Image (cartoon, helix red, strand yellow):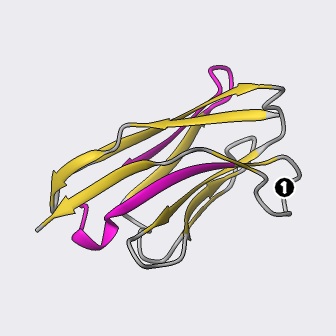
């Protein structure tokens, strides 16, 4: 079992930046791929960014590529999402997720942190 806790959300004006953090605890973190997802009001949850265990590969949704950066510190069991040039359409609840068997569905989820971008 892995527990995930997100932090760093808040309210920001368009063009601003936020950095989300995800702290993992519990059983081993080793080998887990990690991801960030978001859910806007009235919409389905969508993939935002993903990163492999070694950080050798990162993946981004087309809507955030070039503006968001995912990274991780395996020794501290932390995952980050640096969000720059934020837009109102980035508003939503952001969730951290862990995939214990990379290539399959994410199987651990945090409770989410709210990000609100005003125009």
Does 116 appear in magenta?
no
Residue 49 visible, this angle:
yes
Which residues are drawn in magenta?
73-97
What is the x, y in percent for residue 112? 49, 48
Q: Residue furthest top?
A: 75
Q: Please state the total of marks drawn on the protein image.
A: 1
Quarter-wise, where is residue 28 in the image? top right
Relative to 108, is 7 above or below? above
Q: Which residue is mark 1?
A: 102
Does 78 appear in magenta?
yes
What is the x, y in percent for residue 104? 86, 63
Residue 83 visible, this angle:
no
Relative to 77, is 36 above or below? below
Q: Residue furthest front?
A: 42
Q: Foreground residue, 27 or 35? A: 27
Quarter-wise, where is residue 19 in the image? top left
Quadrant where the N terminus is found in the figure:
top right
Q: Residue at x 42, y 78 (%)?
A: 42
Q: Is residue 102 left or right of residue 42?
A: right
Quarter-wise, where is residue 32 in the image? top right
Q: Residues within 10 Å of mark 1 (few under 14, many from 20)?
A: some
Q: Secondary structure at mark 1?
A: loop
Q: Is residue 2 left or right of residue 60?
A: right
Q: Residue at x 53, y 77 (%)?
A: 44
Q: Is residue 36 left or right of residue 34?
A: left
What is the x, y in percent for residue 115? 32, 53
What is the x, y in percent for residue 7? 43, 36
Q: Residue at x 20, y 49 (%)?
A: 11
Q: Foreground residue, 118 or 67? A: 118
Q: Residue at x 39, y 65 (%)?
A: 66
Quadrant where the C terminus is found in the figure:
bottom left
């Amino acid at each position: 079992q892995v527990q995930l806790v997100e932090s760093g959300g808040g309210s920001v004006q368009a063009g601003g930046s936020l950095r989300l953090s995800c702290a993992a605890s519990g059983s081993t973190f080793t080998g887990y791929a990690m991801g960030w997802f978001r859910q806007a009001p009235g919409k389905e949850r969508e993939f935002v960014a993903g990163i492999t265990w070694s950080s050798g590969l990162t993946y981004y949704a087309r809507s955030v590529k070039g503006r968001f950066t995912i990274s991780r510190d395996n020794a501290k069991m932390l995952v980050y999402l640096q969000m720059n040039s934020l837009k109102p359409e980035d508003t939503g609840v952001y969730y951290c997720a862990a995939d214990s068997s990379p290539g399959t569905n994410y199987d651990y989820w945090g409770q989410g942190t709210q990000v609100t971008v005003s125009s």
